[in-house]
Image: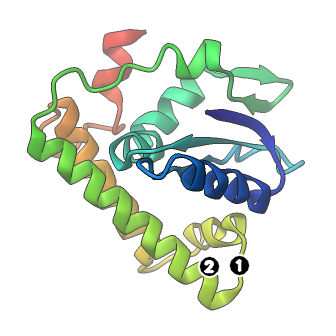
């Protein structure tokens, strides 16, 4: 389930909670895609019931795909299903251990975000603004761990040259 122009995270969480109560075998989680340059604070969110998909969409590989493929309204980036999600090349044949590594890194990232946001009473936007500060940052480390797991699921060896999604973008563009 994809939702655009997300301005109220609590409404989305209520929807996820309702889905989880109605469909107890599922475990819907929110995936947030920050529009970054959009000063209006309008973002995109997805509800997924598996940690692997959450991890792939939270990776810098997907972020770079978004930047390369999104539509642009003046200077604002706009996430659309047609140009970004529907064309995104998911890993084609990851091993079970790679799927588990992505899912585990996604769970760890979500747990860290939830813990820090609760402790400081921050919004998701406030949390991600901490990445603009120099120095050590557990959120940056959690994203790096997720990116490493996602690169392995794509079959990328070690660190990507200049971009975490260089091979993916070259393959699909």
From the image, tell me which residue sits under label 2: 117
Quadrant of the rendering where the C terminus is positioned? top left
From the image, tell me which residue sits under label 1: 122
Q: Relative to residue 140, is residue 102 depicted above or below?
A: above
Q: Which of these two is toward me, 157 or 134?
A: 157
State the residue lying farthest toward the bottom: 119
Q: Position of residue 13 (x, y in %)?
A: 68, 58
Which image quadrant is residue 159 in?
A: top left
Q: What distance separates the C-alpha of mark 1 from that of mark 2? A: 5 Å
Residue in the image at 38% along x and 45% along y: 50
Q: Which of these two is toward me, 59 or 73?
A: 59
On screen, residue 38 versus residue 12, left or right, reads right
Q: Position of residue 48 (x, y in %)?
A: 50, 42
Q: Relative to residue 69, is residue 40 depicted above or below?
A: below
On screen, residue 40 versus residue 123, left or right, reads right
Report helix, strand or loop for mark 1: loop
Q: Earlier in the sequence, mark 1 or mark 2?
A: 2
């Amino acid at each position: 389930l994809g939702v655009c122009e997300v301005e109220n995270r609590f409404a989305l969480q209520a929807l996820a909670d309702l889905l989880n109560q109605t469909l107890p075998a599922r475990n819907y989680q929110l995936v947030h895609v920050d529009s970054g340059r959009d000063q209006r604070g309008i973002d995109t969110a997805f509800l997924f019931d598996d940690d692997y998909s959450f991890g792939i969409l939270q990776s810098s590989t997907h972020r770079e795909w978004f930047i390369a493929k999104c539509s642009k309204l003046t200077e604002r980036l706009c996430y659309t299903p047609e140009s970004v999600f529907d064309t995104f090349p998911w890993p084609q044949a990851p091993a079970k251990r790679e799927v588990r590594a992505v899912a585990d890194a996604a769970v760890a990232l979500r747990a860290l975000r939830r813990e820090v946001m609760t402790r400081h009473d921050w919004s998701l936007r406030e949390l991600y603004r901490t990445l603009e500060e120099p120095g050590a940052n557990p959120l940056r480390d959690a994203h790096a761990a997720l990116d490493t797991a996602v690169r392995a699921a794509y079959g990328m060896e070690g660190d990507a040259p200049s971009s975490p999604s260089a091979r993916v973008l070259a393959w699909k563009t």
